[in-house]
Amino acid sequence: MPELPEVETVRRGLAAKILGQRFVAVEQRRADLRYPLPDDLPNRLVGRTVEAIDRRAKYLLLRLDDGMVLMIHLGMSGRMLLADGRQDPGPHDHLIFMTDDGTSVTFNDVRRFGMVDLVSSNALAAYPALASLGPEPLGDDFTPTVLSASLNGKRTPIKAALLDQRVVAGLGNIYVCEALFDAGISPRRLAKTVVGARAERLVPAIKSVLDRAIAVGGSSLRDYVQASGELGYFQHEWAVYGREGQPCKGCDCDWEANGGVQRLVQSNRSTFYCPRRQR
DNA sequence: CTTTCGTCCTGACTGC
DNA sequence: TGCAGTCAGGACGAAA
């Protein structure tokens, strides 16, 4: 499930391989992703050179030499696969890009929650999905003051508020759980009470959890590419996520006496937390 | 306005 | 063995 660190790792891996490359062939194998692919997408991409690859929240933005931007969102099961030379398409390979040095880039998405769109760069800021996004969590403009201001008065649990992309852009279920653990804040706490000192703890916790995950992604893979050619996914040991009944990693509480990591459901999503550490 | 909830999709897993 | 049911999750639109 790609969140910001995975998308950032995909971005770096893609940049290392196809920056400055030209698309010489684009094969579209199915068009019904989360939204229908733009009309005539392959023909609009062939011949274009990739001039830059940026990321906004969980969106990959491939800037092309004709002023268009290829936007890619991986949804929850989207993957980018790199290979040398033309590959036989496999199941759920929806788009295959060939570049002029013979690299193939395959967008594969089992559940088809991903999206791909082609947008003029000067219309990007007004693109609805991007226009409503909050600050980048790793950016200098994401500060305790800014977070406090957007949480002020909010009656939802802090867990739900942090999943709201308007509050902070790019966090998903896993890193919200991990950041709240790191900051020692209960996921049930109302967002409006996470201001001042608690926001002073939470903001660095979010940045730290994301930074560490990106570092693992970069260091555990050679050029961010696995042997299989898959970009951006990496083994990561969570402190609490997915660890119901097990010890919370790096926590000094008496987990055995208290039953270990607890799981609860908020907004129909699993939350994992340590009730001793997180208040 | 704010907040919650259902929906999309398919593979992995559980339980009978 | 087989099959039905549940779960996972990001983003959005509808409902409350």
Image (cartoon, coloured by chain):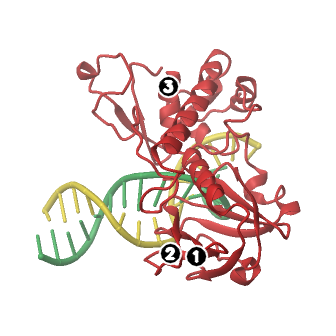
Chain colours: A red, B yellow, C green
Chain name for mark 2:
A
Q: Amino acid at mark 3?
A: Asp
Chain name for mark 3:
A
- Asked if badges 1 and 2 are on one and the same chain, I answer yes
Q: Which residue is mark 1?
A: A96
User: Camera-side residue: A123 or A189?
Assistant: A123
- Say if A129 sits above or below A178 in the image: below
Q: How far apart are labels 1 and 2 at the CA level? A: 7 Å
Q: How far apart are labels 2 and 3 at the CA level? A: 37 Å
Q: Residues within 10 Å of mark 3 (few under 14, many from 20)?
A: many
Give SS at disc 2: strand
* Quarter residue A118 falls in: bottom right
Q: Which of disc 3 and disc 2 is earlier in sequence? A: 2
Left or right of C12 in this view: A266:
left
Residue extending furthest right?
A: A122
Q: Which residue is mark 2?
A: A93
Give SS at disc 1: strand
User: Camera-side residue: A190 or A85?
Assistant: A85
Left or right of A141 in this view: A14:
left
Q: Position of residue C6 (x, y in %)?
A: 32, 57
Q: Amino acid at mark 1?
A: Ile
Numbered label attached to residue A84: none
Q: How far apart are labels 1 and 3 at the CA level? A: 40 Å
Q: Which residue is mark 3?
A: A182
- Asked if badges 2 and 3 are on one and the same chain, I answer yes
